[in-house]
Image: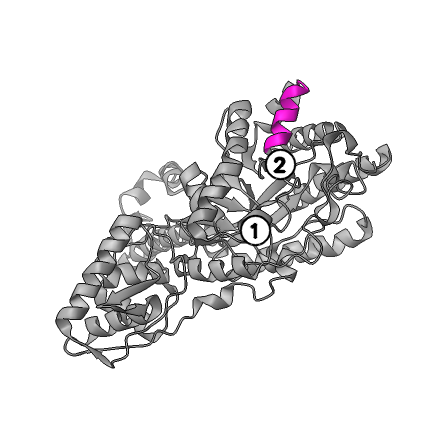
Amino acid sequence: MDLALRVPIADQRPRALLHGDFDGRQRPSFIVNVQKCKLICYAVMKLLCILFFLMVPCLLAKDPVYVVLWFDTEDYVDPISDDAALRIANDLTKLNVRATFKLVGERARVLEKRNRVDVIRALSHHNIGYHSNWHSVQPVPAVYLKQLGMLEGEQEFERRELAGALDVKRIFGMMPICYGQPGSSWAPQTYPALRHMGIPVYLDDGSQIGLDDQPFWYDGILTIFNLGQYAIRPDLDHEQENPAIYRKFAADAGKLADNGGGVISTYFHPTEFVHTEFWDAANFKDGEVRERGAWVLPHRRTPAEAERCFRILKEYVEQAQRTPGVQFVTAQDLLQLYRSPIPPPLAKEKAARYLKQQITFARTDAGDWSAADLLLAVLGLPPQVVDGPTARGATTYASATIPGWLFERSRKDAISFINAHHRLPSQVFVGAATLSLADFAATAAAQVLSPGPVLVEHGQIGFEKYISTDPKGAFSWPIHPKGFAAPELLDLARLQAWTLKPARFK
């Protein structure tokens, strides 16, 4: 009961008692003190109760878990896929869930040609991403980028893919927020090209690169990729498996919530809901090339089978919505939820200690720094996004020490290179000889920590373990030419891993 309500009740007592009389005599002081203590105790207990109920939600609250639901919207062969995309988009809108639909350029152009304004409008209620210009028509990205270096590859990717992204922008009225490769046709040259194209997020799945089954920054792009155990989706064809999948979802969401929060990735293709095979496997398997008039339709599901698939998606979303602490997000949402790729400033000495120990990213309570970020700090450059080196340089400098004046000239030359090209040098000249980037970074770090004679240090790279060592398995996809492997792309990926670091929530 509220204390304010007690006064009127007290007023109903005899007036003599209100003035301190007790049966006509003075009220004993101990009775007055007891009543005062009761009022004080009551007030204190009430305050504690209020504080308890205010604190309980904070004590029980866990870090949020975000589900990014995305659809590779790619089939431009069978018109029935238009209706599947429409149905999915509308069903999710009714559930108050926004997904991310990654469209192939030709898919968007075909929707326009078919005058499917209804589909375009329905998808526009969600995030729009990009999924390459032609998807499975050869050459696909990994095929045409395999023999190119970073700089040539960046230009070639933009030459081939920018037109499709601009078509998506024209048709949907917005620049795609994210990109993801067709199939497993991943390549590191896409990252600087995406930055130049104004696409800030990489959203897909694969095994070429990954970091602790959670999103990361790579070459300045927020990358939701290779989430491992946290890539979860219900089974559209074996419904009996889904109760176990839902239990796994709840357990994994709880695990993430107990450890700082995180992201679960769930993806589908609208064509899956209405076909029993992929549209491209029916036409472009093993690198096959066909004239458009020879394209065939993939096998369709029965209406009942398609309806089951739509229902399973709806049940999965509802199951996730009922899971405490789980929220659906789009690629755009994730970009806002994570901290900027540009880290806070870091003292030279701290950066040098990290690099001297091992050349890899640093993860601290104060922030996260890639190996490139740490090197910039050691060189006294402001935090910024830079690309990794374009080649694996070599150390040809033979002496164990470098004259101080000569190393200072090398240091200034490295700074000038970074400022001019916005990427790390592959090697740094010491007179006519060179230090590999790793050895230069380790030597520069040691010089910051121990000024004096410059001793050549040999850097120990630790970030390459996050890149796949399977050049064939990582690119396994029925559309790639039979036996396709791309060790060259994985080598380039290791060089760009100078920019790799965890993504952290704000």
Residue 198 in the image: above or below residue 497: above
Q: Quadrant of residue 365?
A: bottom left
Please give the residue where the numbered disc 2 appears in the rendered image: 134
**Residue 198's mark?**
none
Q: Residue furthest bottom?
A: 400
Gap between marks 1 and 2 measured at Cα: 15 Å
- Range shown magenta: 105-115
Q: Secondary structure at mark 1?
A: loop
Q: Position of residue 469 (x, y in %)?
A: 57, 67
103 and 469: which is toward the camera:
469
- Point out residue 269 in the picture as x, y percentages from the top left corner: 68, 40
Would residue 345 be visible to someone looking at this image? yes
Q: Residue furthest front?
A: 432
Q: Position of residue 256 (x, y in %)?
A: 54, 58
Q: Helix, strand, or loop for circle 2? A: loop
Q: Amino acid at mark 2?
A: Trp
Q: Is residue 257 above or below residue 144?
A: below
Does residue 95 sit above or below 410 in this rendering? Answer: above
CA neighbours of label 1 inside 10 A, class few (<14), some (14 to 19), many (20+): many
Q: Which colour style is shown? A: one colour
**On the image, which quarter does residue 484 sit in?**
bottom right
Image location (x, y in percent) of residue 345: 25, 56
Residue 186's disc number: 1
